[in-house]
Amino acid sequence: MSTGKLWGIGLGPGDPELVTVKAARLIAEADVVAFHSAKHGRSISRAIAAPYLRAGQIEEHLVYPVTVETTDHPGGYQGAIDEFYEQAAARLATHLAAGRTVALLAAGDPLFYSSYMHMHRRLAGRFDAEIVPGITSVSAASAALGTPLVEGEQVLTVLPGTMPVEELTQRLRETDAAAIMKLGRTFPGVRQALSDSGRLDDAYYVERASSTRQRVLAAADVDQADVPYFSITLVPGPTPTTAIPARGLSGHQPAADLTTTVSTAPDRPAPADSRPDDSITADVPGEVVVIGLGPGDADWTTPQVTAALAEATDLVGYATYIDRVPERAGQRRHASDNKVESERAAMALDMAKRGARVAVVSSGDPGVFAMAAAVLEVSAEPQFKDVPVRVLPGLTAANAVASRVGAPLGHDYAMISLSDRLKPWDVVAQRLSAVAAADMAIAIYNPASSQRRWQVGAMREVLLEHRPPQTPVVLGRDVGGPTESVRVTTLGELDPDEVDMRTLLIIGSSTTTTFDTPEGTRVFTSRRYGSVPSR
């Protein structure tokens, strides 16, 4: 068997549209997609690549054991990191040895202050490896400033913010232009070096360049306590001859020259109540509204939700659900796939922290196996304590399917997700058994997908231990949508091959009854025991 190939994929600085054509193609073609994250599990690289992933790919999530130098590892911080890289390389080597193509994602460029290089050193000597370069954060930050970084024979020096202040100061004095990386906790020292070298007044700060959360400030105006790692300080060589497109540049640009948009997108107007100099800063927190569109029919979206969508400056959600919302001039749409709930939540909260009014879009009701829980979980982090979060209800898929056949959920019922992506199957099976034994009707969400096929059959076997084969089962697919279909069968005759991710199942209880009418089979679950019509 021939071995697979390792691709180091540069994703650019943050905007998915800045991913190269080659990188997008290779991500989609890869057997395995690997990416790094801290322990919180939110991978910026995966979020950037999400539009280019395909169903069926293996994902290798490489989670750093530490991100700061405090650790109990016997080898200290470096020992913990070296051990992690060895283990991560071994995981990828297993796929490569089996003949699988591995795309290892890297924000920016794979060989520019990137984690990819540590995998390259460990794997390139054993397997075929190739680099796909990406746009660096230096280029993206320079573009955000809208002014040349160097020209003519000027020298650009790229410096890590982790350098000692004295050395950083000296290098800033000696160079024409500078880009200082790795800020975060190092920014106080960087600011001191800029001041000591006489470069502070000419320095600019760019946060999360090219992303929807981009922010540009004069370096002198930055709050040292609120600097993320994904930020950069630039000291241009030539004197800027045009206005820097940013807010908060007191002493650098007149207020009339500052943009008034919620983000750096030129086609998005600011809300009527925003001010030119603070419309996306932490001083004016926005709001996150988590909304439910209902199952499919636009008429099932509540007026309250419609109003919230109209007021939002930004929409965040799974691409399929975002596509259901009519486009509105000036409103930005941030679509992703359905496996990055925490990343979506963090993005929405961070934009709101900067002043945006964000609607996080779910299908059905946002509190039922949807985004409300994810947003609230992330909002509990201290950094988002001042960001308001509201949840607006929507019509559930379970109630929509039930309405098509009558009232199968007319008495006590439970909602259970059959997906074992976020909880083990043993837990799913235990809950199915408990609810079936309690004689409750059950609405089954997320029953199957293209890669997850066996769970429906396993569910049926668990339920048959407590329910007779003639128990009514309702299969509702795409209810309220253009391909709607609803069918009534029995538990014994339920065919797992008829079920996919867009199907919702309702399993009856002992009091669930079916009867035929000219309009089709009707189903109801009686609220009374002891006087149930025979089936």
Image (spheres, rainbow, N blue to C red):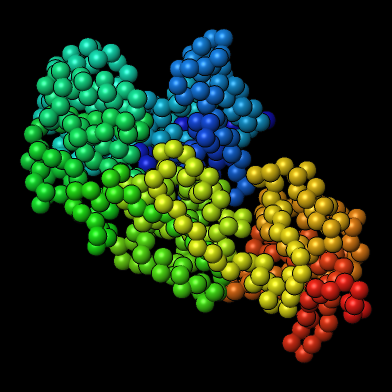
Q: How many marks?
A: 0
Return the residue nearer the eye: 233 or 400.
400
Return the residue nearer the eye: 202 or 153.
202
Q: In percent of the image, x 19 and y 48: which residue is there?
A: 277
Q: Quadrant location of residue 493?
A: bottom right
Q: Position of residue 83 (x, y in %)?
A: 56, 17
Q: In percent of the image, x 78 and y 80: which residue is there?
A: 522
Residue 182 in view, yes or no: no
Q: In percent of the image, x 89 and y 61: which residue is there?
A: 467
> Quadrant where the N terminus lies?
top right
Q: Position of residue 267 (x, y in %)?
A: 26, 59
Horizontal side of residue 171 vs 530, given as left or right: left
> Quadrant where the C terminus lies?
bottom right
Horizontal side of residue 146 vs 531, given as left or right: left
Q: In percent of the image, x 77 and y 90: which residue is there?
A: 518
Q: Position of residue 170 (x, y in %)?
A: 18, 13
Return the residue nearer the eye: 225 or 108.
225
Residue 285 in view, yes or no: yes
Q: Position of residue 355 (x, y in %)?
A: 31, 51
